Amino acid sequence: MKDLTRGSIVGHILQMSPPIMAGMVTIMICQLVDLYFVSGLGDPAVAGVAAAGNAGFLVNALMQVLGVGTVALMAHAVGRKDRGDANLIFNQSVVLSVLFGLLTLAMGAALSRPYMRSVAADQATIEAGTTYLLWFMPALALEFAMQVLASALRATGIVRPAMFVRVLAVAINIALAPVLISGWGTGYALGVAGAGLASSIAVAVGVLILLAHFRRAERYVAFNPAQWRPQPRHLKRILNVGLPAGGEFAMMFIFMAVVYYVLSDFGAAAQAGFGIGQRVLGLIHMPALAVALAAGPIAGQNVGAGNGARVRDTFVKTALITTAVMIAFMIPAQLKPELLLAGFSNDQETMAIAYLFLRIISLNMVAQGLIFTCSSMFQGLGNTKPVLLSSATRVFTYSLPAIWLSTRPGFRMEYVWYLSIAATTLQAVLSLWLLRREFGKRLGVPKVKSAEQASSEPVAPLAREPA
């Protein structure tokens, strides 16, 4: 366990964010590798896999319920030095991970085809997306266990073991993708089904390794079968924090579904170009998101310790870092988007759409970085309802105008991206205002010398994190 209530805030962020980023980047690279090999199957396959991947936002919503609730409540317990409560929250989260995993498998079997019919541009895209989803659902179901284990470690300031497991799982996925999708070495190509199967095998291996780590090396929290009986009071604590954060991802699902819907009239090439551009954009968002995620446990432990000045300082420093990182990535996205998108499709129309998307939508990267920061701070505070409010505002200020514009004569797909910039900027402004209000309610009025007093306190040496 690492004590995040002492020491340099920037130091903690810089120590924790690279492993977090490495884990997320490897996941995104895995998705891009899938798209790369699937692209050889044609635009319907690319559009189908990309649209099917959007369904992952719904599952990610449930994962956020678990992840955010676990991190926030365990971080508060760690800050209070209440190991018993941290262990109880961990084991109750394990119970929820099993329930959510089973629910995901049932939803995938029943709803994959109806979902693809609602968003795809043609029958070939429907078939490709449905096939991919059915083979990919086991990976999503197993991700709940991975999420709980990684979140428990992150709440205690430990991020490297989960990162190593993620990297290994992605390496397995990347190795399997060409074999299963294109039939390398076997001569038996599974196509889009192979992309889903590769992911499912890789996640299964990752979960087994992380379980072994917990049983062998983790000491602060541990599996306790006596605490696996569902306890409504503690499940409610997890859900009260996690559900609004999960609702944020559900809002993103609606947002993305609207994009696919309004692009459907432009054909599979438009949806494929958007899918490729969106994946690459997600990849270049990863460094700023990793910084924001590192700030959550820092804020959470200091909330538990009653150190309001340090919570505020965490926000300011995190916002400055995420802004600088987003500007650094926005420049190449504006000047040379083709360098970031090279190699994902041989179709000129598809790539022209991807270039246009990335050049326009990258203008909102600073606003998106501030949204990441605010969301993480709300998680640390243990109140994620404002996050859901700001996300819902973005969805409704985007979706209704986008659908209306798509029915007007002369509608162009660029309107979708410009409207997204406006909605994202509005969300960033609202998030900052809501966070300022929450600080006032939870932390009180800041004292002028509080930061100086905090910096003058003796600093304990940083705990070493186990490999």
Image (spheres, grey):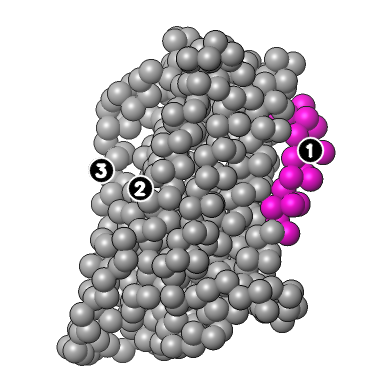
Image quadrant occupied by the C terminus: bottom left
Q: Quadrant of residue 96?
A: bottom right
What residue would you read off at disc 2?
Answer: 22
What residue would you read off at disc 3?
Answer: 328
Where residue 172 appears, as percent x and y from the top left, is: 45, 36
Q: Quadrant of residue 137?
A: top right
Which of pointers 2 and 3 indicates the residue nearer the eye? 2
174 displayed left or right of 423: left
Which three-letter amino acid code belongs to the residue tagged 2? Ala
By secondary structure, the bulk of the magenta-drawn segment is best described as helix
Pick whichever, 438 or 453, lies toward us.
453
Q: Secondary structure at mark 1?
A: helix
Q: Residue at x 76, y 52 (%)?
A: 103
Numbered badge on residue 263: none
388 displayed left or right of 363: right
Q: Earlier in the sequence, mark 1 or mark 3?
A: 1
Which three-letter amino acid code belongs to the residue tagged 1? Ala
Q: Earlier in the sequence, mark 2 or mark 3?
A: 2
Numbered badge on residue 109: 1
